[in-house]
Image (cartoon, grey):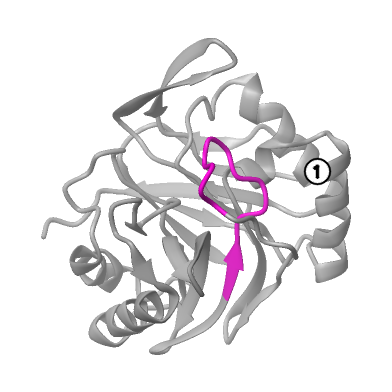
Amino acid sequence: MKIALVQLDANDRLWKSSEMAGLLRPLKDMDLVVFPECMPFDKSSSVEYAEAVSILEGVSRQSRAPAFMAGGYVLQNEIMRNAVFLTFAGKTVDSYFKRSPWQEPDISPGGESKKFIWKKGSCVPLICADAADNPSPNGTRMMYEAIRCGACSDVPIVVASYGTWLFEDYWQEPLKFWSRGTGAPVVICGVSGVGDSFEDNGILGNYGGGGSGVFWPDGQAPSQRKNRGIHIVDTVSSSMRSMPIPRP
């Protein structure tokens, strides 16, 4: 499977739904395109679930894009969710809600794992902290559910993230644990640049820093990229290449 990871800067000028078609058009030969967590619906969006679906389906029709994963903060029956949607051929096929909110007190967590299925493939979606909480009882349970959903060498786990420290043990160990434990490539799309600051257990950090790439289940070194760009993972040839973000 060829998976294109659109790694934007944390405060990128292209961080809006109106720019998505231009990002997708050059990627028509991909099997799947993945945007970072909360692209395009950040906390300021306040979109209803149905409106988010309509926007993403419009992007798909406008760009004639391959399958893509995108989403963010949406309201579902007055409940705030952090969601990722799978959209293909002008239709939103499925959605997944983040199950492990991190510094998101207003978010109601999802309750089940999913397997996204479309014409050219399938994957098990996760959102950011869902993949970082491992090894732990909750993480092990979610990993077991991912295996039951079909995660394997041909069905990757795909993580949309707006995190940081993707090159550090904070993320490296959990992602390696996921890939080894499920036997599946773990593909993560993060954000580059330097974004807003946060505090985690007394440690200050900034969102961003890059790290999009893939963690292989056979133990070979992860393939990751720091810079803003489109980073293409080929799970068949176990390779990765990069291309620049197209100009608007």
Viewer-side residue, 214 vs 58 = 58
Classify residue 81 as left or right of residue 183.
left
Residue 158 % position (x, y): 60, 56
Most frequent secondary structure within the magenta stretch: loop
Q: Describe the element under mark 1 as helix, strand or loop.
A: helix
Classify residue 67 as left or right of residue 13.
right
Viewer-side residue, 135 vs 238 = 135
Classify residue 108 as left or right of residue 137.
left
**Residue depicted at 65% across the width and 20% down the height:** 169
Instruction: Write down the residue under mark 1.
Output: 139
Classify residue 120 as left or right of residue 27.
right
Instruction: Look at the picture and state if 55 lies above or below 74.
Output: below
Viewer-side residue, 59 vs 233 = 59
Indicate the quadrant where residue 59 lies. bottom left
**Residue depicted at 31% across the width and 38% down the height:** 10
| Residue 81 visible in the current orientation | yes
Q: Residue furthest front?
A: 78
Q: Amino acid at mark 1?
A: Gly
